[in-house]
Image (cartoon, rainbow, N blue to C red):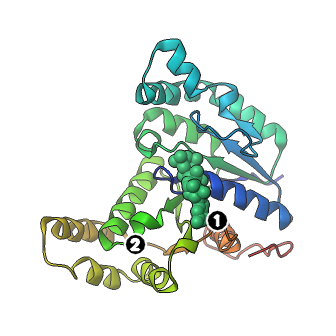
Amino acid sequence: MEEPGTVYFTGTAGAGKSTLVRAFAEWMRSAGYDATVVNLDPGSEVEDGGFDVDIREWVRLADLQDEYGLGPNGAQVAAADMIALKIFEVKQAVQELRSDYILVDTPGQIELFAFREASRAIVDALSGDRSVIAFLFDPALARTPGGFVSLLMLSATLEFRFRLPLVNVLAKSDVLTPEQLAEISAWADEPGQLYEAVTRDAPTPDVQLSTELFRAIENMGPLGGVVPTSAKETTGLEAFYQSCQRVFAGGEDLEPSQASGPE
Ligand SMILES: Nc1nc2c(ncn2[C@@H]2O[C@H](COP(=O)(O)OP(=O)(O)OP(=O)(O)O)[C@@H](O)[C@H]2O)c(=O)[nH]1
Ligand SMILES: [Mg+2]
């Protein structure tokens, strides 16, 4: 059996990770692929998230707060370390399901996920050779040039920390007008357009910082675009799947879709 493809859904708090994981899993199943959905968010309050493997079976944020008298942030830090200790149990539970794809929902506190050593241990334990990080751009931030550049920095940080290939995804694209969507796509596809947008406003310290950040990002290499998706309207899911496939195949030919699902 070929090694499963693992997709980590990351992004700022409320970017739409959990909703997209769920919509994508449903799309995959309707397209004839089997997927295991893993919840790695110990603070998730979703009762029925449709998770096949759920970290809350081992580590629950609320329990840590009660047991050790921790505040929400202290509990998150403790939870991240405790998850790392349980990760082989999680891995075993995932492997028993023998799916072709593993979709991993990550905690909302991205700084914890991105910067704790424990997260790296977690990702290393769960990832095979076919792994990709999906970084979700929240339209609330992505629609201004400065916000877009900040998200690119965060995305690059994740790529750098985890040393995994990364696909940028524009989540909740249904909340954007077609003009906004076209503008954001152009920023991702053409560095020149982004530069023009960043420097369009009067050179306040804000704009100067965005310009410097833009230069740093530009030097890192091509952005590779953003894939617009909407979990609400179930659009862009096939395109996202194809992007992941491209990564798994090392940029070579795409695996043909086995059946056509809703796009
Ligand atoms: N319009 C629209 N709203 C969405 C979409 N996806 C998610 N949302 C809304 O965005 C909010 C956050 O969604 P979640 O999926 O919980 O986001 P998250 O990134 O998992 O959030 P945390 O885990 O709390 O960081 C919810 O109110 C969702 O209903 C979408 O495709 N379109
Ligand atoms: Mg969530």
* Image point (41%, 74%), residue name: 222
> Residue 107: x percent and y percent?
53, 42
Relative to 87, is 93 on the left or the right? right
N-terminal-most mark, 2 or 1: 2
* Image depth: mark 2 or mark 1 in front: 2
Relative to 233, is 64 on the left or the right? left
Against 68, is 210 above or below?
below
> Residue 67: x percent and y percent?
54, 13
Q: Secondary structure at mark 2?
A: loop
- Tell me, yes or no, whether the two marked residues, 2 and 1, touch with CB atoms within 8 Å: no
Against 127, is 27 above or below?
below
* 79 or 233, nearer to the observer: 233
> Residue 236: x percent and y percent?
65, 74
Relative to 166, is 71 on the left or the right? left
Quarter of the image holding residue 73? top left
> Residue 3: x percent and y percent?
75, 51
Mark 1 — residue?
Answer: 244
Residue 125 seen in render: yes
* Image point (66%, 30%), residue name: 56
Amino acid residing under circle 1 = Cys
Q: Which quadrant is home to the C terminus? A: bottom right
Quarter of the image holding residue 229? bottom right
Amino acid residing under circle 2 = Arg
Relative to 75, is 104 on the left or the right? right
Mark 2 — residue?
Answer: 143
* Image point (64%, 65%), residue name: 244
Q: Secondary structure at mark 1?
A: helix
* 102 or 162, nearer to the observer: 102
Q: Which mark is residue 45?
A: none
